[in-house]
Image (spheres, rainbow, N blue to C red):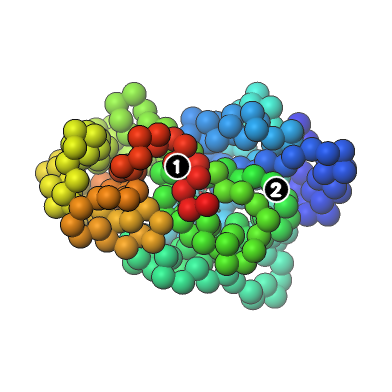
C-alpha cells in the first residue's frame, strides 16, 4: 500500500495503474474508520483492481459552530486497517493541498442539499459536493462507494455526477450497525455510556417501522408513528421524515416506490442521523446499489 499526500504523486501512481488496465475503485472518507468504512473498502477491493481510499477531514462541510476541530482522528490505526483490507493507494492530503490559497469555486447542489440535514447544516452539502467533485477529479475512479447511512449525501452525489457528467458509477452500500442496532458512525465516539444507551431509540424506532413495512404497512403516517413513538429519549429531534429515495420529497400518503424513513436527532451535544430504506421491491440490496441509475 502506498501512502500519498500530494495530487501530482497521486496522478502519476494512478496513471500507471490505469495504463496497466486496472479498474480504479474509490472510497472517500474522513478517517477514524469503523466497520461501516471497512465494509465499503471490502466491496471496493472485491470489485476493483486498484482500491483507493482517501482520508481528509474536509473543513468546508463543517459549519462555524460544528465539530471540525474535535472530529476524531487516528491516522496510524486507519493506515493499518487500510493495509489489512488490501487498499493499494491511501491518499491523505493536507488541507492546503486540497484548498490552495485563493480557492473560490464551489459546487452548489441545489434543493437536494437544502432539505432535511441541509436545513440544520447550511452549506454542509455544498462542502460535500465540492470536495467529492475535487476528489473525483484527482482520483478519476471507475467506481466510488458510499454508505447508505448518509442517504442524503448519496442523493446529492448521484445528482451531481449526472448533472456534471462525471464518468463514475456510484455504489451505495447498506448501513452497518453495532450488535445493539446503533448505526456505526465516527461520531459515536462522542457519546457517554448513558447517551449511547439513549441513542438506541433511533434505530429501535426505525427498525420497528421497517418491520411494519415488511409486514405490509404502506401508510406514511402509520410508518412515521411507529418510529416516532420510540424517539422520546432524544434531547431534540431535528427531523423524522418519510421521503422519496430519489427526490427526497415527502411521501404524504402511501409508499409505493422506494422511500427512506430518516431521523436526525440530538443526544446531549451529539447530532446523530440514521435511516431505513423502505423499498416495495423485494431485493433491496440490489436496489440500493443501483438507486437512481
Ligand atoms: O461521508 C464522509 O465521510 C464525507 O462526507 C466525504 C464523502 C468523505 C466527503 O468529505
Q: Residue at x 53, y 57 (%)?
A: 157
Does the rendering let one see residue 64? no
Label at residue 288: 1
- The residue located at (36%, 28%) in the rendering is 178
Q: Secondary structure at mark 1?
A: helix
Q: Indicate the quadrant where residue 3 lies.
A: top right
Does 66 appear above or below 14?
below
Label 2: few (<14), some or many (≥20) within 10 Å? many
Sequence order check: which comes first, mark 2 or mark 1? 2
Q: Residue at x 78, y 54 (%)?
A: 7
Marks 2/1: CA distance? 20 Å
Callout 2: SS: loop
Residue 40 x, y percent position in the rendering: 55, 35
- Percent across and percent down for residue 272 are 33, 47
Which residue in the protein does label 2 denote?
A: 141
Q: Vertically, is 32 above or below 266?
A: above
Q: Position of residue 106 (x, y in %)?
A: 59, 71
Q: Position of residue 114 (x, y in %)?
A: 39, 68
Residue 130 drawn above or below residue 1: below
| Mark linked to residue 67 | none
Left or right: 27, with 199 as reference point: right
Judged left or right of residue 196, residue 42 is right
Residue 170 relative to residue 186: left or right: right
Amino acid at each position: 500500500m502506498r501512502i500519498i499526500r500530494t495530487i501530482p504523486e497521486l496522478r502519476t501512481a494512478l496513471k500507471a495503474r490505469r495504463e496497466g488496465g486496472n479498474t480504479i475503485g474509490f472510497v472517500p472518507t474522513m478517517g477514524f474508520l469503523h466497520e461501516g468504512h471497512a465494509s465499503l473498502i471490502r466491496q471496493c477491493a472485491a470489485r476493483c483492481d486498484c482500491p483507493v481510499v482517501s482520508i481528509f477531514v474536509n473543513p468546508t462541510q463543517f459549519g462555524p459552530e460544528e465539530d471540525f476541530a474535535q472530529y476524531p482522528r487516528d491516522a496510524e490505526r486507519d493506515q493499518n486497517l487500510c493495509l489489512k483490507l488490501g487498499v493499494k493507494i491511501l491518499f491523505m492530503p493536507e488541507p492546503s493541498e486540497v484548498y490552495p490559497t485563493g480557492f473560490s469555486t464551489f459546487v452548489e447542489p441545489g434543493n437536494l442539499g437544502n432539505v432535511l440535514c441541509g436545513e440544520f447544516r447550511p452549506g454542509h452539502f455544498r462542502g460535500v459536493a465540492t470536495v467529492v467533485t475535487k476528489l473525483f477529479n484527482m482520483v478519476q475512479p471507475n467506481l466510488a462507494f458510499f454508505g447508505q447511512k448518509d442517504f442524503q449525501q448519496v442523493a446529492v452525489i448521484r445528482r451531481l455526477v449526472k448533472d456534471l457528467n462525471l464518468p463514475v458509477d456510484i455504489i451505495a452500500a447498506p448501513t452497518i450497525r453495532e450488535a445493539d442496532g446503533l448505526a456505526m458512525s465516527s461520531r459515536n465516539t462522542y457519546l457517554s455510556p448513558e447517551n449511547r444507551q439513549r441513542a438506541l431509540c433511533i434505530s429501535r424506532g426505525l427498525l420497528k417501522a421497517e418491520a411494519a413495512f415488511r409486514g405490509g404497512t404502506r401508510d406514511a403516517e402509520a410508518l412515521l408513528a411507529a418510529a416516532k413513538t420510540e424517539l422520546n429519549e432524544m434531547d431534540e429531534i431535528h427531523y423524522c421524515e418519510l421521503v422519496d429515495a430519489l427526490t427526497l420529497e415527502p411521501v404524504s400518503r402511501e409508499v409505493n416506490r422506494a422511500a427512506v424513513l430518516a431521523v436526525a436527532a440530538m443526544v446531549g451535544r451529539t447530532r446523530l442521523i440514521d435511516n431505513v430504506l423502505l423499498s416495495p421491491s423485494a431485493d433491496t440490496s440490489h436496489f440500493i446499489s443501483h438507486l437512481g441509475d
